[in-house]
Image (cartoon, rainbow, N blue to C red):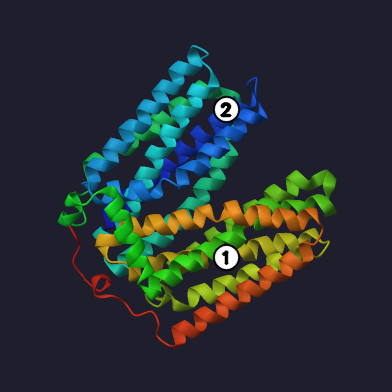
Amino acid sequence: MKKLMYMILLNNTISKVGDGFFYIGVLWTAMNGPTGVLAAGVIGFLEATVSFLQIPLSTIVEKSEKKQLFIFASIIRLASVMIVAIFFFFQVSFFWIALCYLLHEIAVALIGATTQTYTPQIFTADEYRIFQVKASTIQQVTMIVTLSLAGAAYYFIGFIGILVVEAIAVILYMIVVSRYYVKLQPDVQISQEQTHVELFLDGFNYVRYNPKLLYIVGLCIIANGLFAPLLQLLVPKMIVNFYPEQASFYSSVILSLIFAGMFIMGVILLKQKEWLKDPKWFLPVGICLQIPLIACLSLQNIWFLLFGGLIFGLGMCLTNNAINFLFVQETPPTHLGRVGAILNTGAQGISAISIPIAALFLQSENYYYYLLGTILIYFILAIVHTILVKRQFFIKNIHLDATETSY
């Protein structure tokens, strides 16, 4: 089982590196094209569009054998890369490349949705928590390396070279799936008789009438609703106000420190594995660790901001893992796909509301009120969660205590 865990971690890393290179390659190709920023904006729009396909994708996952689905999604992903290469070589309109990019990202999202359902069912509760911390820790390193190398790779090997990197990554991914992944049958046989709409409504009602899951989904939506404008608008805005000539440099340093903080906390959790057996304190501590960065935004001192970014990363690691642990703990294997899709869609879709609201505050220069409100909401979340834990609101479900795997 340990070998399978490392193979999945390796495969996830390969997939994310390839996808990251592909994204950067398509983005820079769009920027260098005749329509420039407009085409790049289309890529960003398509990226956001995929997040709203989580629910239909989750129903496909529940009605399919997981190993075959990994292979099927990878074939679509590889085919889209090959078609993009042909379109680029013959200088076809970027519109068609964008459509292939959308198909590619749908395949990547399908792989992600399958992984989200697959891993909790093949590992025991303790094994899954270790896997999740390792996965999130490796992901931070992967993001830093990919963002650092992809732009340089585009400069040296061009867009075709980037496409070759992604094609190799997908092929390696399929090889690892074929050789090491175990088969995992559809989550419930009855799902084969249900339509996709019925599966979605069943998942929606399951969350609606389950107070614990309703709380977890709401918590995730609120956390992401605060996080998205913080990093995409507030931090850049403050840095531009205080250090206009060095804004891009300091913004990248703060972002790197946030990822570094997440990596450091991940390593700490892996060294202190006994903490993973009782992670109920992760969320309130993680939320409190995110507050210093918000407070530092009102100070005209870059060193406070850099320190706040590092501490923010430590807190983000704890918060993300806490929400994921609670989600898996309170969701039976038969509903992981549909409930996970609702959680992911809400978490990613809330930014479409929270970012414009934050922009209005920034435009009117009333951002101090926004910062104060954000800190207040963070404190309320930490207090509410602590009270719920004290009252034993979260109790492990039977399916998590099982010592046997599901295959």
Q: Is residue 307 visible?
A: yes
120 versus 379 height, above or below: above
> Could you say which is closer to the camera, residue 124 or residue 184?
184
Name the residue located 35 percent from the left edge and 71 percent from the top edge.
209
> Could you say which is closer to the camera, residue 52 or residue 226?
52
x and y percentages locating residue 400 in the rendered image:
27, 71
The single residue placed furthest to the bottom in the displayed view is: 391
Q: Is residue 118 visible?
A: no
> Could you say which is closer to the camera, residue 214 or residue 325?
214
Name the residue located 46 percent from the left edge and 26 percent from the top edge.
163
Q: Which quadrant of the figure has residue 117? A: bottom left
Would residue 55 appear left or right of 60 to someone viewing this image?
Answer: right
330 versus 344 height, above or below: below
* Amino acid type assigned to the residue bearing label 2 in the image: Tyr
x and y percentages locating residue 129 in the rendered image:
37, 66
x and y percentages locating residue 159 in the rendered image:
53, 23
Q: Which quadrant of the figure has residue 342? A: bottom left
Would residue 375 appear left or right of 344 to someone viewing this image?
Answer: right
Question: What numbered label is drawn on residue 154?
Answer: 2
Q: Which residue is mark 1?
A: 314
* Amino acid type assigned to the residue bearing label 1 in the image: Leu
x and y percentages locating residue 70 in the rendered image:
29, 42
> The N terminus appears in which quarter of the rendering?
bottom left
Q: Are marks 2 and 1 in contact (CB under 8 Å)?
A: no
76 versus 303 height, above or below: above
32 versus 145 height, above or below: above
Question: What numbered label is drawn on residue 350?
Answer: none
Dot 1, how many residues are within 10 Å of its Cα: few (below 14), some (14-19), or many (20+)? Answer: many
Dot 2, how many residues are within 10 Å of its Cα: few (below 14), some (14-19), or many (20+)? Answer: many
Disc 2 and disc 1: Cα gap in Å?
Answer: 32 Å
Q: Secondary structure at mark 2?
A: helix
Q: Mark 2 vs mark 1: which is more N-terminal?
A: 2
